[in-house]
Image (spheres, grey):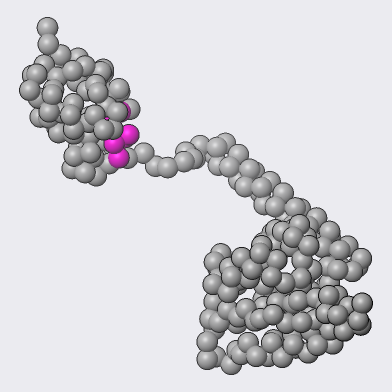
Amino acid sequence: MAPSLTNALTLKRVALYARVSTKNNGQDPETQLVALWEYAEHRGFVPIGEYVDIGISGSKDRRPELDRLMVDARHRRFDVILVARFDRFARSTRHLVNALEEFQALGIDFVSLSESIDTSTPMGRMVFTVIGAVAELERSLIRERVVMGLNRARKGGTRLGRPQVPVDAAEVTRLRVQGRTWAEISLTLGISEMATTPQLDAAGCKFLNFPDPDLNEAAGAADASRGRAQKFLPHSAQPR
């Protein structure tokens, strides 16, 4: 096999990723890109393109160029991802670990210049393992603090969960007897449809058809699509 062809087959394709948080404020992605291009040339990588997010915070879950980079990675369009620093790429340790795990599964190496991390080397793989352990420890500590805080709040008599919305059961019943659908009642009273059920139960209501056949038919037709074939009426309003 000719040497030139051998070199072409062994050369790694590299994607360059850069990010700056603000536009026109002294931050220029070229500062990162120049260093990335120089490193790629030194390593003999073949750059296949730049992925640059400008004016986007690293805390954002979605970044256009980062999203495009991940899509291209899944299509195996390059063999190496090159960044200037970890914080230019990942929003958190957990995000970094998840991305590195995916790259590892895809057979893609990750190189960070500032931290001198290259997952294609034994030392780089070791650092990746340590980062994963730190991220797991961080997640466990956060979970532990949350559980401790919840337990302390319960012991202090704090009611957890969503605040209860006051619902006038009598008003709900009155509107329902008038033939209003659950959706209309919810809109009128500013509550969810599901909020009416426990309130009517507490008021001593049960499932029963309306005594007026016409009213019952109209309300039943309106509620049929929601799976509400039966209606609530208080005991006092039931026919004897």
Taking the magenta stretch, the answer to whether it contains residue 196 is yes
Can the viewer see residue 171 in this picture? Answer: no
Q: Residue at x 46, y 41 (%)?
A: 161
Vertical relation: 219 (above or below) 20:
above
Residue 203 at x, y percent in the picture = 26, 22
Residue at 88% in and 62% down: 126
Residue 124 in the image: state x and y as whole percent: 86, 68
Q: Nearer the viewer, residue 7 or 143?
A: 7
Q: Report if residue 95 is visible in the image.
A: yes
Residue at (22% x, 34% y) in the render: 182
| Rendered residue at 74%/85% (across/down) | 36
Front residue of 234 and 148: 234
The residues colored magenta run 192-197
Q: Which residue lies most toward the top here?
A: 240
Q: Nearer the viewer, residue 1 or 153?
A: 1
**Viewer-proximal residue, 167 or 14?**
14
Left or right: 167 in relation to 41:
left
